[in-house]
Each structure stands twice: as structure tokens, then as C-alpha cells.
Amino acid sequence: MNATPLAELHPDGRQRFAAPIWTLLLLAPFIGEVLSGSTRTSFLFVFLPEVMVWGVGALFCRELVRRWRAGGTSLLLLGLALSIAEEFIIQQTSLAPLPFPASHPDYGRVWGVNLIYFLFMLGYESVWVAVVPVQVAELFFPQYSRMPWLRKRGAIISCIAFLLGCRIAWYGWTQQALKRMGVPPYHPPLLTITLGFSAILLLILTLIAGTGISGTSWFDRSHAGFAPADSIFGGTGLSPDTLGLITILIAPVQALLIFFCMRGFAQGWNVEVEVPEDQVRNKNRSSGGSSPEPAAA
């Protein structure tokens, strides 16, 4: 499965994909935010930054899937990456202590994350902001459904619009909206934000490993025309499907490893703290133990 050259798909006409692009840009925030009631009609001024974040984000997800000739599962993985970016990096709604039932510190907040809220938004945003708008837009324009829509200049403009929209969304939510809700200023730990970046990267690597973007995936090798993999001890070894599954599972296992390592180092168990000798002796006396004698020089 190799990437499709752009010139082979739509070499003519700059305005050829303008209609499907704008349809997707508007559908993503409209389906995900307006129809759900998250964005009320009295606050439609925030629809523009939502187009810049959700619309362009969904456009990027679709563009990568079509260029890599991937399928619906790959689109869902990229939607999950977009949702993590929104919840951990852009607006950080899953990190800040919000006055929502799913963010209550007694049961909804774990390790600095609004866990219940995050899990809900992870499923909601990946489906209703990425997967569904892309499918609807392609139903409107079936003749372009298998083609990439962005040229080089359009991709650059989209990147600039996305980054600008992320900045506007971050400032409008973290610096303005939270104050009006009575939430004190909150600065997420760098550790948590780094974990969000790592999760996004691992999702993309999972997509690359599963679809064989740089060549042929393990799953393709189970078809006719491919020889089975050989083991170092002779024989056929594991089947191509088993190797493909192991390749995909490497990414979430690495994510869990990074997460628990970062949590462990954040506890400071590897940091030695110097304690005065008198304090050690007093502690030993109170516990009934004998105080150690200092070593001879």
C-alpha cells in the first residue's frame, strides 16, 4: 500500500475540490458542536474557530486516509488523535478541574485527568467530528470520495488555519471561558501534556504499522503471491496475521509503558533527600531502634 501521487489523481483545475472541502469544513463543527447543543445559537461567534480546529482537523484526517489508501478504522484512529489533541493540548478540557459531574474529584478525576469526561469525549469527538462528517461529505460528492482534496498550497494554508484556530480556541477557553465559570487558573503539568503528544504519535505510528504505508503490511502477506515469514531457527515461524497483530499492539503497550514510567518518576521515589544526623537518631529512638554509628574516617 503505497501513497498515491497527487498529480495522478487531480492534475487539472484548482477549484475542483473547493465544494467538498468547504462542505467538510462546515459539517465537522456543525455535526459535532451545533447539533449536539454544545454550541448554542447565541454563541455562534465561536463557530469560526471551531471550523478552523474541527473542520480543518477532520479534513486532515480524511486527507491522510485517502493518500495512504487506508480505510474506516484508520480514519477512526486519526479521529482519536484529533480528540486527544483537543482534550490534552488545545483546550485542555480533560485536564482542568471543571464544575461538571464527570469532573468531580471524588470519582471523576484520576491522576490529574477528568477520566470519565475524557473517555466520553474521546468516543464522541472521534466519531461525530471526524468519521461521520467525512462520510457525509463523501456522500454529497461520491465522484471525489476516493481522491485527496488538498494540493500543496491548500495543505499549507490549512496548517496555518489549524494552528491559528488552536491558539484562538486555547485562549478563548482557558483564559476567558473558565474565568466566567468561576474556575481558578489552571496550568496542566508538562508531564500530562507530553503524555498527550506521545499518545497522538503512537496512534499515527499504529496506523502506519497497520496499513503498511511505507510498503506492504503484514496483513497483505497472508494473500497469494507472498511467501511466509521464516524464523531464525528454520521453519515458517508466525503467520503474517499474527505478526501484523503484534505490530499493532506494540504502540498501545509502549504508551502504557511511557505512562507508568512518567507516573513513577513524578512520585520522586528516585530522589534522595539529605536528612540531618540528629533527625535520624531521634526517629530511631522514637521507633525503638538503635541509632547507627557514623562510619570511621
Image (tube, grey):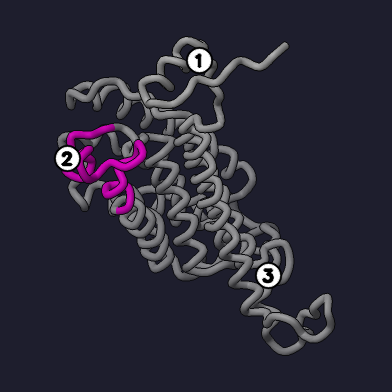
Q: CA distance from mark 2 to mark 3?
A: 44 Å
Q: Amino acid at mark 3?
A: Met
Q: Is residue 76 magenta?
A: no
Q: Amino acid at mark 2?
A: Thr
Question: What residue is shown at x 27% (from left), y 47% (from top)?
Answer: 117
Quadrant containing the C terminus is: top right
Mark whose residue sits in front, 2 or 3: 3
Residue highlighted by disc 1: 275
Residue highlighted by disc 2: 41
Nearest to the observer: residue 291 or residue 155: 291
Residue highlighted by disc 3: 1
Question: What residue is shown at x 72% (from left), y 62% (from top)?
Answer: 214
The numbered mark, 2 or 1, whose residue comes first in the sequence reads 2
Mark whose residue sits in front, 2 or 1: 1
* Disc 1, SS: loop
Mark whose residue sits in front, 3 or 1: 1
* Disc 3, SS: loop
- Rendering coords of residue 68 (x, y %): 62, 62
Nearest to the observer: residue 194 or residue 216: 194
Res 93 quadrant in image: top left
The segment highlighted magenta reads 97-119
Question: Which circle marks residue 218 in the picture?
Answer: none
Quadrant containing the N terminus is: bottom right
The numbered mark, 3 or 1, whose residue comes first in the sequence reads 3
Question: What residue is shown at x 36% (from left), y 35% (from top)?
Answer: 92
Do residues under tags 2 and 3 come within 8 Å of each other at their CB atoms? Answer: no
The numbered mark, 2 or 3, whose residue comes first in the sequence reads 3
Badge 3 crowding class, 10 Å Cα cut-off, few under 14, some 14 to 19, many 20 or more, is some
* Disc 2, SS: helix
